[in-house]
Every structure is written in C-alpha cells, then in structure tokens.
Image (cartoon, grey):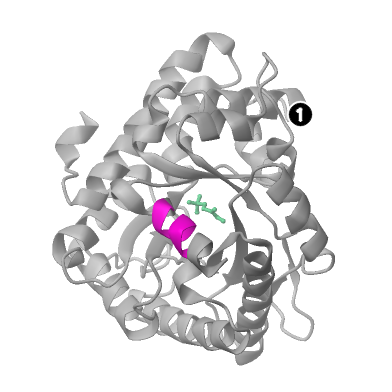
Amino acid sequence: MSEQLASTAKAMVAGNKGLLAMDESHPTCGKRFAKLDIPQTIEMRQAYREMIVTTPGLGECISGAILFDETIRQQTKDGRPFAEVLTAAGIIPGIKVDAGTKELAGHPGEKITEGLDGLREHLAEYVQMGARFAKWRGVITIGDGIPSRGCIQANAHTLARYAALCQEAGLVPIVEPEVLMDGGHTLEQCRAATEDVLRTVFDQLHVQRVLLEGIILKPNMVLAGLACPNQETVDEVADATVETLLRAVPAAVPGVAFLSGGQSSELASARLNAMNVRYKSRAPWALAFSFARAIQQPALEIWRGEEANVPAAQQALLHRARCNRAARRGEYSAAMER
Ligand code: 13P
C-alpha cells in the first residue's frame, strides 16, 4: 500500500505536469456561471465539464484532474464516464471529498471544514469509481487578531484525519490548507500565518501517522492580500513562498502543488515560473500547480454555455495548461501570452 501511494503521488507531479482542479461545488460553480449569464443547471455543468475533459492534448500538460461528486458520476454525451475519458487521456482522476466550510464555533470570522462523518464509506465508493487521489481544503483567514490558534489547530487536525482515512483507502490525499488572499494584509503577515499553519499541519500529519511520501501538499503562495496597496514583485513572491516552505515542509513530501487563489492566470504562471527558475535544482519537492481559476477562467469566458464555442474554449484551456507546464520547467515568459 505504501509503495502504491508513493508511486501515485510521484505520478501526480511527474513530467513537469500539474493538476487541474475542476471540483467547484454547486454554489462556487453557480457564482462563476452567473457572472457570465450561463444557466446554473446540471446540464450546463455537464456540458462545461465535458468540454474540459475532452480537450485534445490536455494529458500532455495535466497529470491529474480533481472532480466534484456530481462530476465523477457524469458521462459525456456519448455515454463515457468522465473518469474513464480522463484515464484514457493519461490523466489521473481525483475527487474533492470535503463538504465545505462552516463558521468555527467560538471563533468569529474563522472557518472549519466539514466532511469527516462517513468519509471512510464515501472514499470506498470513489475508489470503485476510479479515483486515485482526493482533496480536502481547510481555510485560514488573515484579519484583526486572526488566524487564531484554535482555528489553525482544528483545521490541521481535520486535514490529518482526512489524510489518514485516504491512505487507508489507497487514495493519495491532497492536503490543502489555504491561507486566503482576501483582505489588505501584507506579504509578511501571509508569510507568518502560512509558516505557522504548515508547521501545525505537518505536526498533526505525524500524530495521525500519515505517510508523507504518499501525500501532495496544496498550499497558497506567500503573497500580500488582494487589497494591500503594496504588491511585491514576482521574484519576491517566489522567494518568500519557497523560503517559507523550506522551513516547514519535510523533504519526504514528493510534491507541492499550489492553488491559484484568485491571482490572475498570468501572475500565477509567472510566480510559479520564478520559483522553478530560482529553486528547482535545490528544492526537495516538485514545485507544481493545482489551479482551478488560473487554468479554467479564460476558457469559461470563451465557452459561455455555447456549443459553438467549445473548440475555442478548449484551445484557451490547453494554452493555460501549456503555460503552467512551461512554468514548471522555468521556461514560461510573457511572450507565451501573445
Ligand atoms: P483556485 O486555483 O481557483 O484557487 O482553486 C484551487 C482549488 O482547488 C481550491 O480548493
């Protein structure tokens, strides 16, 4: 089992590829559709995700795709389950298994992720449907007097319990503690919060006997908040991010696959590229990606719910996937965007 977990985890970050997150819950997907006047129906979600999974050549840049519960149960119009279409394209199917966030009791402004109840049974079903890895996102907010110790510890403990259950089921857990970009905080505040969160998460993973060789870490990059007037350069963000990871992430972890978190597609690629230019030869783990918005958004804006736009949307999706594969090699440049 340990060998299988370690080999799946390695495959998820092999070949300078990365992960495509397409696991938006109904409310999140609904918000993105609503902005473009796309009807929020099961048929539209099926059509959108069919556009993604049938993109020709996607497997050249994407090693794995994270699906949502509804999506892993869906099929193409000609009746092929999405998980099968992905596998045939050389893309490993994975599944989001958390049930979203709720207010953390006693901690105003902070959240805890739910979904541990019945998780063992859910995981067994997803294995039957072809999933080989899973994802769980914990959310940490920076603000006045937060994040609190209570919030960091509760989320770290929950992530570790989830990770242990995944490994028991033979699934590689993507461990995602996201320090949000929302707000006016500085990069230094994000650095301090991220280091604290990661140290606590790895402590809890150890306590829960999680095999580090068989996980993928999905962290935020270390950045100033979206509303902070002072935004560091691409190289400064790359340095702050990798320095923080070097302090807190054990070398046994095979891969770090960043979330995009609301950065523009271009900035996410440029920052990932700078990390690989500066650290690829000496970082102990792969510096990879697991983007949702930073890969999908341009394609969604072209697709807009119209069958006729599918080829152009697929081109846009493939372009972002290629930009991010180039970023893993340290070969991305603004010229690729022309
Ligand atoms: P973004 O890249 O859009 O932040 O999404 C990644 C993800 O899976 C969030 O859980």
Task: From the viewer's side, name the closer residue of 132 and 155.
Answer: 132
SS majority, magenta: helix
Residue 215, position in %: x, y? 50, 67
- Give residue 258's position: percent from left, percent from top: 41, 59
- Residue in the picture at 59% in, 51% down: 132
Per the image, is 7 magenta? yes
Of residues 309 and 38, the one nearer the viewer is 309
Q: Residue at x 52, y 76 (%)?
A: 211
Q: Amino acid at mark 1?
A: Ile
Taking the image as shown, residue 185 lies to the left or right of residue 245, namely right
Residue 85 placement: quadrant: top right
Q: Is residue 137 magenta-colored? A: no
- Quadrant assignment for the N terminus: bottom right
Q: Position of residue 262 (x, y in %)?
A: 46, 53
For the C terminus, give its image quadrant. Answer: top left
- Residue 41 drawn above or below residue 233: above
Which residue range is magenta in the image? 6-11
Q: Secondary structure at mark 1?
A: helix
Task: Tell me the residue that label 1 is attached to.
Answer: 42
| Side (left or right) of 50 relative to 212 | right
